Image (spheres, helix red, strand yellow):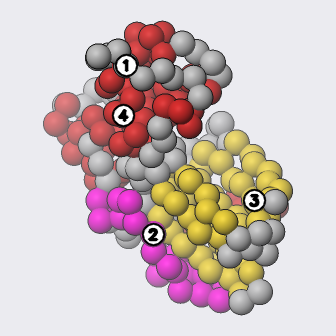
Amino acid sequence: MSASKTILLEDSPLVKAISFMCVERPGVMLVPPDGTWDLVFIRDKHGTRAIRTGLSTTSVRLQHNGSEEILAISFRASAKLTAVDAVASLDKGFLLQGDHKRVAVAGEKFEVPAFHNADVFVERLARQGLIQANPAIQSILDGEPIALSARTLQRQFKLTTGMTHKRFTMIERARLAAASLRKGEAAQNVVHDLGFYDQAHLINSLRDILGQTPSQLGHLDPPRP
């Protein structure tokens, strides 16, 4: 059993969401790629662990030991820790140095945040120049790219996010497809609306990127031969 709460930060150029969850029992959680990278703080009877993740290209299975409190700060793809190689961070998690009171981020030490002051923690990172928003990348994500050459935009996109814009778009499309199917949208409509070639293409994308089968989503029939 677990309890959770989440704040969505629509106007923040750096953070997409801040979430807190109490996990009472051991188990496994499937975390799909959502176009963000995270700073995660896990408290249990042994102390506090801080983890930095890169963006994900596939779903990740997280093992919970139980009796954990988990704070996750989910950063936008257009935000980048200046001292971090986003390409090398893709699909990886890194344990940060620190203890139950302080944590080292990009070589600087900060007080371990809580749910109520996580925004202040992010502001301190930004004030020290350790994290920056890339307006060019956000313009691409908003569908209104600024006036730079396509090559420059693609290079900046990979340096900031760790992946190509094409790969990022494929992941986002799979995520949107799964959300539509869970709401009961017909598979053929999802194929048409999101630009899949056919239903088989949709199924393969869901399996490869989200690690979920059509039966797990509940609203998708197998393609006809």
Cα separation, mark 3 vs mark 4, equals: 30 Å
SS label for mark 1: loop
**Which residue is labeled 1 in the image?**
223
Tell me what residue is drawn at x 59 percent, y 29 percent: 218
Question: What amino acid type should be assigned to the residue bearing mark 1?
Answer: Pro
Give residue 205's mark: 4
Which residue: 65% across, 22% down? 183
Q: How far separated are the C-alphas under marks 3 and 1?
A: 39 Å
Relative to 88, say whether 168 is above or below.
above
Give the mark nearer the N terminus: 1 vs 2: 2
- Residue pictured at 56% horizontal, 44% vertical: 13
Query: For the point 52% across and 80% down, which residue is it?
Result: 96
Residue 104 point in image, percent of width and height: 55, 81
Residue 91: image quadrant is: bottom left
Q: Is residue 88 above or below residue 55?
A: below
Q: Which residue is mark 2?
A: 93
